[in-house]
Image (cartoon, helix red, strand yellow):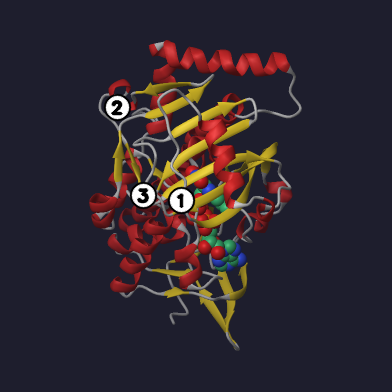
Amino acid sequence: MADRTQVAIIGAGPAGLLLGQLLHRAGVETVIVERRSRAYCEARIRAGVLEQATRELLIEAGVGERMRREGLVHGGIRLHFDAESHRIPIDQLTGGRTVTIYGQTEVVKDLIAARLESGAPVVFDASDVRVEGIGGDAPVVRYRTGDSAAELHAEFVAGCDGFHGVCRTLAGADAQDSWQREYPFAWLGILADVPPSTDELIYARHARGFALHSMRSETVSRLYLQVAPDEDPDAWADDRIWDELAVRLHADGFTLQPGPIREKSVTPMRSFVAAPMRHGRLLLAGDAAHIVPPTGAKGLNLAVADVAVLADALDAHYATGSDTGLDEYSDRCLRRVWRAQHFSWWMTSMLHVDPRDDAYGAELARSQLRYVCTSPAAATTLAENYVGLPHEFAVRR
Ligand SMILES: Cc1cc2nc3c(=O)[nH]c(=O)nc-3n(C[C@H](O)[C@H](O)[C@H](O)COP(=O)(O)OP(=O)(O)OC[C@H]3O[C@@H](n4cnc5c(N)ncnc54)[C@H](O)[C@@H]3O)c2cc1C
C-alpha cells in the first residue's frame, strides 16, 4: 500500500468513494482509508432518492451505467392526508427535471467496483485511524490493519468519514461554529420483498404520525413509520408494522400490499451543520460536516454536491496551481447546505406529528399541506427543492 499520496480520503461512503473516482479520472492520486469491511459498506441500507444533478454526475463520473438500467425515474410524488391523495407533478413544475430511485447501497457497490477496477488504492478494515498535521503542509494519516501499523503522507486530507467520524473534531471547537436541532421522533424503516403498492413515493401525514412508502426496485419496497426516538424495533412485529402503515397511508383508492420484511431499523432525526468546511489542509465533505432529517431525501445528494465542488477545486489546484476553488469551497457548499437544511426541516415539520405540539400546531401543518396541494406556487417551491436546487445553486463539473 502507498505511503505517500496527494489526497488522503478518510471514509468509503458515497462522499469518499465518489471523490476518489472524480480525482482518479482527473489524474490526482488518492488513497481511501475506511474503518469497515467492504461487505459492511456494501450492505448498509440508507438513502434511495437521487436528484437529477446527482444522477448526471454519476453518469459523468463513469459509474452510472447500472443506475441508468435499473434506476426508476420518477416525475412526481404523492402527499396523503385527511384520507385524500394529491400528486405533485415535479417534472411539470421544474421544466422536465426528475428524481431517480436507486439505493445508496447500489451507488456504493458501483463506486467500489469502479475503484477496484481502476487499481487506485483503497484500504478497508483500517482501525485506530488518526490524522495529524492538518495545520501544516504535510498531514499524516496513521492507521492499523491487522497487526501492522501504517503511515500515509498526504498533501490534503478529505474528511468523508460521516457524522461519527474523527475528522470534524480535528480542527477543535474554537475553530468551528455549529448549529443543530434534535427532533422528538425517529423513523422505523423496513425493507420488504414485495412489489411497491404505488408507482411514486407517498409521503403521509396522519394524526398517529408520519409514514412514507418508498421503493428500491420493481420488487423491493422501503417503508417508514414515525416512532419515538427510543423505540425498540423488536417491539414491532411484522403484522403490527403493516397494520400501522395501512392506517397512516390510507387514502381513497389506495391499497397497501404487505409482504415479507427483510430488514428493520430505527433512524434518529437530527439537523446539524459545522462551519467552515475547510481547516488548512483538511476538507470536510458530506455527513462529516452536516446532516439533515431524511424527509427531504437530501443527505446523500448533499454529500455528492460537496464532492463535486471539492473535486473541481483539487483538480484546479493540481492542474493550474489555482487555489480559488479551495478558498471558496466552504462558502460555496454551505449556501446549498443551508437551503437543504431549511427544506428538510420544513418537510419534516409539515409531515410529522410533534408530540410537544398542540392542536393549533397540527392545524397549521395541515393548512400548509393543503396549500402545497392547491397552489401552483407552493407546489413549485416543494418541487424545485425536492428535485435539486435551481440552476444558480446547481453544481456541474
Ligand atoms: C442510519 C441512516 C439512515 C439513513 N437513511 C436515509 C434515508 O432514508 N434517506 C436519505 O436521504 N438519507 C438517509 N441517510 C443519510 C445518507 O445516507 C447520508 O447522508 C450519506 O450516507 C452521506 O454519505 P457520506 O459519505 O458523507 O457519509 P457515510 O455514508 O456515513 O460514510 C462515512 C464513511 O466513513 C467511515 N468512517 C467513519 N469513521 C471513520 C474513521 N475514523 N476512519 C475511517 N473511516 C471512517 C464509515 O464507516 C463510512 O463508510 C441515512 C443515514 C443514516 C446514518
Residue at 38 percent of width and 12 percent of height: 376
Q: Is residue 10 visible?
A: yes
* Residue in front for this viewpoint, 247 or 108: 247
Q: Callout 1, which amino acid?
A: Gly
SS for dot 3 = loop
Q: Callout 3, which amino acid?
A: Tyr
Estimate the spatial distance between the alpha carbons at disc 1 and disc 3, rounded to whole Å: 20 Å
Residue 91's disc is: 2
Q: Quadrant of the C terminus?
A: top left
Name the residue carrying label 1: 259
- The count of marks equals 3
Report the side of 175 relative to 289 (left or right): right
Residue at 28 percent of width and 44 percent of height: 56
Q: Residues within 10 Å of mark 2 (few under 14, many from 20)?
A: some
* Residue in front for this viewpoint, 234 or 396: 234
Q: Residue 350, image x and y in percent?
A: 58, 24
